[in-house]
Amino acid sequence: MDALIIAAGFGSRLAELSPSKPLTPVCGVPLIEIGVRQAMLAGVTRVVVVTGHQAEMLEAFLAELSLRAGIEIVPVRLKDWSTPNGHSVIAGATRCEGNYLLMMADHMFEADILERLLHEGGTDRGVTLAIDERLDNPLVDPEDATWVRTDDRGFITAIGKSIAPYNAVDCGAFLATPELSEAIRAAIVAGRPGSLSDGMQILADKGRAATMDIDDAWWLDVDDPRAHALAEDMAPWHLAPTFAALSRVD
């Protein structure tokens, strides 16, 4: 299966640490490399990365990483990287074969989250989103989180940064089908900006947006200096298989 990693944005809140958010190091390893290696450990055999801000720098690193890690990495450059993240999904999905694991370049996950997610597909859904039902998780930034409301089946009824009420938070990892990019396109045609959440809401309205609760597993959105400091402290423990793979290969 392919993985699609969104890495096009500016990342203004991490700009003081690195000129490129995906290349921001955590314990000496760029975020994008951690994401690629996490996807590999989950069972992904090819990675598509949507680039934008500092594209040439990032794409040069990806070419080197592809050789070093032994996996095909396909860069897809987004001309206008200031557009909402759904535009990156549309661009990258054109290079994915069938269903794909969708990840954000600045998110980290314990190994079993992504591995479990790869087995969550079904004919009753167009997308499955990893969610965290621990609303008091201290690692979640409530000012930046995307919130989710689900029904009794665990399917999404509403998703967004300002919805209320909600019962979970979006973890930033999806098992996507071609329906997701089609839904984002439909949202744009309908006058929406074209965020990933816009497309997710369209699928939710059709009863096609499922979820997978990560239970007590660890994840982190490395979006600002506070989160980066947490990642430096916690990632080696929670991502031990990823860092072990790095030591064996490199």
Image (spheres, rainbow, N blue to C red):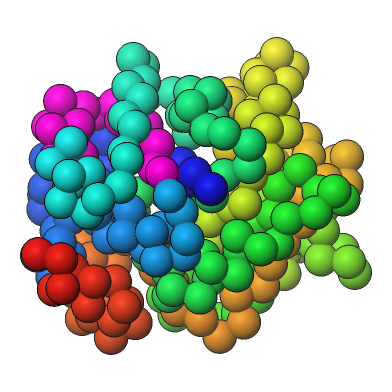
Residue 226 can be seen in this image: no
Relative vertical location of residue 29 with respect to residue 74 in this rendering, above or below:
below
> Residue 235 at what x, y percent from top left?
27, 76
Q: Residue at x 31, y 78 (%)?
A: 241
- 84 vs 26, left or right, is right
Residue 64, located in which quarter of the rendered image?
top left
Relative vertical location of residue 139 with respect to residue 173 in this rendering, above or below:
below
Residue 121, located in which quarter of the rendered image?
bottom right
The C terminus appears in which quarter of the rendering?
Answer: bottom left
Extent of the magenta region:
46-62
Q: Residue at x 67, y 72 (%)?
A: 213
Q: Residue at x 66, y 63 (%)?
A: 119
Does the magenta run of residues contain 55? yes
Residue 123 can be seen in this image: yes
> Residue 176 at what x, y percent from top left?
64, 44
Q: Residue at x 11, y 47 (%)?
A: 18
Q: Nearer the viewer, residue 63 or 167?
A: 63
Q: Nearer the viewer, residue 118 or 134?
A: 118
Q: Nearer the viewer, residue 40 or 126?
A: 40
> Residue 6 at what x, y percent from top left?
40, 40
Relative vertical location of residue 244 with respect to residue 188 in this rendering, above or below:
below
- 243 vs 111, left or right, is left
> Residue 195 at what x, y percent from top left?
56, 33
Does the magenta run of residues contain 152? no
